[in-house]
Image: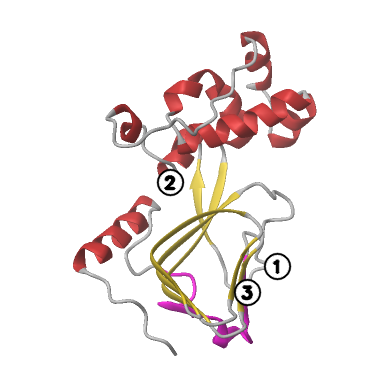
């Protein structure tokens, strides 16, 4: 088995802070310290759907789009304090107030999708991404709608110290068939991909890793 990258104390603190942000302890992992494809007949599949996933997900509940941003998003302060630019974030124009008010009363995601027009449906998805990854103040008008569609749920998390993808083996992230656009959070210290190995993303993934090494 290849040796994972050497990490500094600052690296470990960064990883532990990400774990804490997710509500997890520093040593709270899904499987064990390491995920090695060699232990899973050459292919690890992870998914929010336990029927598909070879490793059981950790589910972190959230009750608003703001809470979801707190789990996986970029802090608004990064933009307001000038640490990051949001010039590549597409902030969609909000629908009229009467439509926002109506859709904000949707009973659940299915009811929302049934009532929303195609433009409103696609706009809400774009606004949700902008809210989470950008400056949420710029899509604040959307927030009641976003809470109705995305605000209550649970985030599937997969955490490990080291992920090792062996020669010609695969690590695959698959979506939940019942909610294919739901994000999946991966929090690792290191990822090592051996020659011919594949890291396959089929879902909406938020990946955090301190090192990502691909070997020829």
Dot 1 crowding, Cα within 10 Å, few <14, some 14–19, many 20+:
few
Q: Residue at x 68, y 16 (%)?
A: 102
Quarter of image, res 195: bottom right
Q: How is the image coloured?
A: secondary structure
85 vs 6: above or below: above
45 vs 86: above or below: below
Tell me which segment is drawn in magenta. 29-46
Q: Residue at x 22, y 69 (%)?
A: 8
Dot 2 crowding, Cα within 10 Å, few <14, some 14–19, many 20+:
many
* Separation (CA) of disc 2 from disc 1: 25 Å
Dot 3 crowding, Cα within 10 Å, few <14, some 14–19, many 20+:
some
Q: Residue furthest front?
A: 216
Horizontal side of 158 relative to 98 (left or right) equals left
Closer to the eye: label 1 or 3: 3
Proximity of marks 3 and 2: CB atoms separated by less than 8 Å: no
Task: Give residue 71's mark.
Answer: 2
For marks 2 and 1, the one nearer the N-term is 1
* Separation (CA) of disc 3 from disc 2: 24 Å
Image location of residue 181, percent across then percent down: 66, 46
Q: Nearer the viewer, residue 167 or 172?
A: 167
Asked if residue 64 can be seen in this view, the reply is no
Q: Residue at x 68, y 33 (%)?
A: 108
Q: Residue at x 58, y 78 (%)?
A: 197
Horizontal side of 90 relative to 4 (left or right) equals right
Q: Does the segment drawn in magenta span residue 34?
A: yes
Q: Nearer the viewer, residue 27 or 39?
A: 39
Proximity of marks 1 and 3: CB atoms separated by less than 8 Å: no
For disc 1, the marked residue is 51
């Amino acid at each position: 088995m290849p040796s994972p990258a050497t990490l500094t104390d600052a690296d470990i603190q960064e990883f532990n802070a990400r774990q804490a942000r997710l509500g997890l302890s520093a040593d709270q992992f899904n499987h064990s310290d390491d995920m090695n494809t060699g232990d899973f007949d050459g292919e690890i599949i992870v998914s929010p759907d336990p029927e598909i996933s070879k490793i059981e997900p950790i589910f972190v509940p959230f009750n608003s789009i703001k809470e979801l941003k707190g789990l996986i998003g970029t802090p608004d302060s990064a933009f307001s304090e000038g640490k990051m630019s949001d010039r590549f974030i597409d902030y969609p124009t909000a629908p009229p107030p009467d439509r926002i008010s109506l859709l904000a009363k949707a009973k659940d995601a299915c009811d929302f999708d049934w009532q929303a027009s195609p433009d409103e449906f696609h706009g809400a998805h774009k606004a949700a991404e902008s809210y989470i990854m950008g400056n949420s103040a710029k899509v604040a008008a959307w927030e009641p709608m976003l809470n109705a569609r995305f605000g209550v749920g649970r985030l599937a998390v997969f955490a490990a110290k080291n992920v090792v993808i062996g020669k010609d083996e695969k690590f695959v992230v698959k979506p939940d068939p019942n909610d294919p656009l739901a994000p999946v959070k991966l929090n690792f210290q290191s990822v090592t991909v051996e020659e011919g190995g594949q890291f396959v993303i089929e879902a909406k993934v938020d990946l955090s890793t301190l090192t990502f090494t691909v070997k020829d």
